[in-house]
């Protein structure tokens, strides 16, 4: 049963990464090909790297990585999943704060919320670049707190 779940998760990641590759360009440029490489030593590393990249690109990619068991995702994907979860919670907090402050500050609260969401978008881009490089580099400002706040990922 575990082998079937692992195969299904790998198939979902493969389909999503190949669609993403056709939209954004070829994954071969960063050293990860959705069709696999000729070397078998990098297959689990490639799947781990793809899951780490997908965490940042869409909510669906985050859900696929979140729903994968700990055996299916490696340390790189777990690290970036933890970072992106905290980033999603921060974005949600910014939106809730903006809606709560709207009656008091009017539409000027939208400027502050827009700045905060732009900052989270910038951190997502930095996270994608770190995931593409295969690095476990914490995000600026919030990266240190991700492991302390979300230790059970």
Image (cartoon, grey):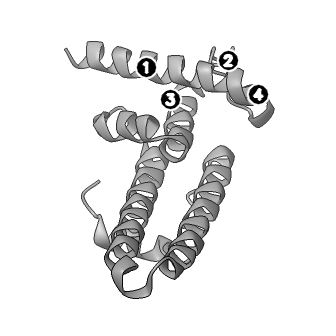
Label 1 sits on residue = 12
| Among the two numbered marks 4 and 2 on one chain, the one whose residue lies closer to the N terminus | 4
Label 4 sits on residue = 25
Labels 2, 1: front one: 1
Give the image quarter of residue 100.
bottom left
86 left or right, relative to 107: left
- The CA span between labels 2 and 1 is 18 Å
Task: Tell me the number on the disc at residue 20.
Answer: none
CA neighbours of label 3 inside 10 A, class few (<14), some (14 to 19), many (20+): some
Q: Secondary structure at mark 3?
A: helix
- When the figure is inspected, residue 124 is found, relative to residue 94, above or below; the finding is above
- The CA span between labels 3 and 4 is 22 Å
Q: Secondary structure at mark 2?
A: loop
90, 139: nearer the viewer: 90
Label 2 sits on residue = 37
Labels 4, 2: front one: 4
CA neighbours of label 2 inside 10 A, class few (<14), some (14 to 19), many (20+): some
Q: At which x and y percent is residue 7?
A: 37, 15
Label 3 sits on residue = 44
For image coordinates 40% across by 74% down, the residue present is: 98
Labels 3, 4: front one: 4
């Amino acid at each position: 049963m575990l082998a079937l779940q692992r195969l299904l998760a790998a198939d979902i990641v493969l389909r999503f990464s190949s669609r993403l590759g056709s939209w954004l360009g070829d994954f071969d440029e960063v050293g990860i090909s959705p069709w696999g490489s000729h070397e078998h030593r990098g297959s689990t590393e490639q799947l781990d790297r793809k899951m780490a990249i997908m965490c940042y690109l869409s909510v669906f990619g985050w859900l696929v990585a979140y729903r994968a068991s700990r055996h299916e995702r490696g340390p790189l994907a777990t690290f970036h999943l933890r970072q992106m979860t905290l980033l999603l919670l921060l974005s949600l907090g910014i939106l809730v704060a903006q809606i709560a402050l709207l009656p008091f500050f009017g539409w000027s609260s939208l400027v502050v919320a827009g700045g905060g969401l732009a900052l989270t978008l910038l951190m997502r881009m930095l996270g994608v670049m770190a995931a593409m490089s295969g690095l476990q580099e914490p995000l600026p400002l919030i990266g240190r707190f991700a492991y302390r706040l979300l230790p059970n990922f």
